[in-house]
Image: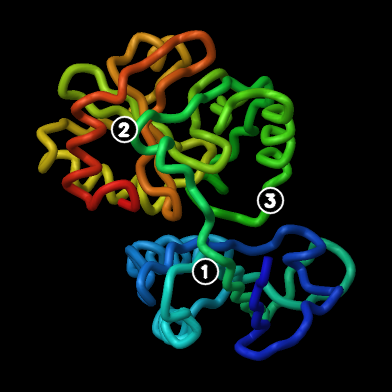
Amino acid sequence: MSIDTLVNGAPSRVDPLDRGLAYGDGVFETMACRGGRIRWLEHHLDRLVLSCGRLAIPADRDALRAEIEAKCPPGDAVVKLIVTRGVGTRGYRAPQAPEPTRILSIFPWPDIPAAHYTDGIRLKTCTLRLGENPQLAGMKHLCRLEQVLAQMELEGTDAHEGLVRSSSGLVVSGIMSNVFAVQGRRLMTPRLHLCGVRGVMRRVVLEHAAAAGLEPVETDLRLEDLLRSDELFVTSAVAGIKPVNALDARSFPVGPATRALMDVIGGKDA
């Protein structure tokens, strides 16, 4: 697999003393480039700049946009931007005047089976629980060891994605996606005030729910709430909307609400 990477706008390597490498001190965005343009770029920049602000990492929105657009390939690709606090000395103390590191990588577009959109995917509930920390909730920060361990649970199973809960038992998300449940005309998703990532496609779905005839609700959900739902689906910026046809032993239809949202937002790549 060919990967093109730039560090601070130039072909280079990451300094071994970079705080993103040493401590996960930074944030990232994984973006879908379709036909030479980033889908929902301003949504990605909203989250990136907000997250950098919460971590006190300087971020110039216009400069970040310009760099992403300048390096975006002409076809389809996955564009990942990491912003760290930059190089520091040994120890947790953050530098008083950080000079952030930008790592921009271009990956080939993944081969996503068409059946994931027509027939749906299988979810497996993971045993791993996500730690609850409101100071980090919502951000796509670089500390992803929980997700690595959760992903390892899927090895040797027929599941396409894992469902993760918080330490108090609340449903949070998929390992690399957000989760939605449909009950009647209510479209429910976890409110993510304690942990989890407020995904860009999650935001898009909430913004377009009314156009699909659904009432969007961010609320606390438990596993039993999902199991008694009419439909389930997961979302991510790259994969769009994927219907769920099974959660553990419970089967689900690929229902009309999920289809309506896919149509409203733009099909399988929405």
Tell us which disc is closer to us: 1 or 2: 1
Q: What residue type is labelled 1?
A: Val
Q: Residues within 10 Å of mark 1 (few under 14, many from 20)?
A: many
Marking on residue 143: 3
Q: Name the residue under label 2.
A: 218
Left or right, 145 with respect to 253, comes to right
Which of the 4 quarters of the picture holds residue 96?
bottom right
Identify the image's colour scheme: rainbow, by chain, secondary structure or one colour: rainbow
Q: Where is residue 102 in the image (x, y as percent from the top left)?
A: 62, 78
Q: Which amino acid does label 2 sit on?
A: Glu
* Residue at image location 65% in from the left, 56% down from the top: 142
Q: Distance between the residues labelled 1 and 2?
A: 29 Å
Marking on residue 5: none
Mark 2 or 3, nearer chain start: 3
Mark 3 or 1, nearer chain start: 1
* Residue at image location 57% in from the left, 72% down from the top: 106
Q: How far apart are marks 3 and 1 (CA)?
A: 19 Å
Marking on residue 79: 1
Along the viewing direction, whichever of 73 and 194 lies nearer the viewer: 73
* Residue at image location 75% in from the left, 86% down from the top: 12
Q: In which quarter of the image is the N terminus?
A: bottom right
Left or right, 218 with respect to 2, comes to left
Mark 1 or 2, nearer chain start: 1
Along the viewing direction, whichever of 263 and 224 lies nearer the viewer: 263
